[in-house]
Image (tube, grey):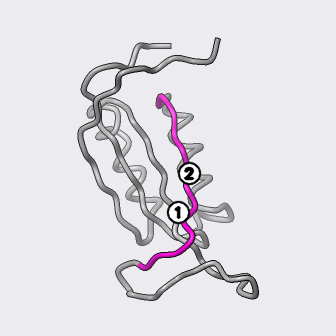
Amino acid sequence: MSKLVGEQQLMRIFIGESDRHGSRPLYEALVELLRKEGFAGATVLRGICGFGANRVYHTQKLLDLSADLPMVIEVVDSQEKIAAVMPQIDVMMGGGMITLEKATVIRYSPKS
């Protein structure tokens, strides 16, 4: 495991829960790609409500089983590693948004 401390890059990928890549949920396909490419880690967060470019409001309601809730995949790694995988991510995504920002990593280590 390499040390991932100091200035790195945070990538957030905003998609919908119902977005797909082939027969798989897009968030699963993206996390698998990032794992295969040797990224330090990735986390998928499921939102409770939100809207995107089409301005459709999505929310989790008791009787609504097809809410298409917002999903955010967060990844922290080097700027070079993120730039190298971007073309593959672009091919996989139909819609959504990706943001990048600087992140200072102060600790990165597995559980003892």
Q: Looking at the rendered structure, which numbered label has been put on residue 44?
A: 2
Observer-nearest of 22 and 54:
54
Up-down relation of residue 40 to residue 70 (above or below): above
Q: Quadrant of residue 64?
A: bottom right
Q: Dot 2 surroundings within 10 Å: few (below 14), some, or many (20 or more)? A: some
Up-down relation of residue 37 to residue 4 (above or below): below
| Magenta region | 39-51
- Disc 1 + disc 2, Cβ < 8 Å: yes
Q: Looking at the rendered structure, which numbered label has been put on residue 71?
A: 1
| Percent coordinates x, y for residue 37 in the rendering | 49, 33
- Residue at 61 percent of width and 73 percent of height: 18
Quarter of the image where the C terminus is located: top right
At label 1, the amino acid type is Met
Q: Is residue 46 left or right of residue 100?
A: right
At label 2, the amino acid type is Val
Q: Looking at the rendered structure, which numbered label has been put on residue 93?
A: none
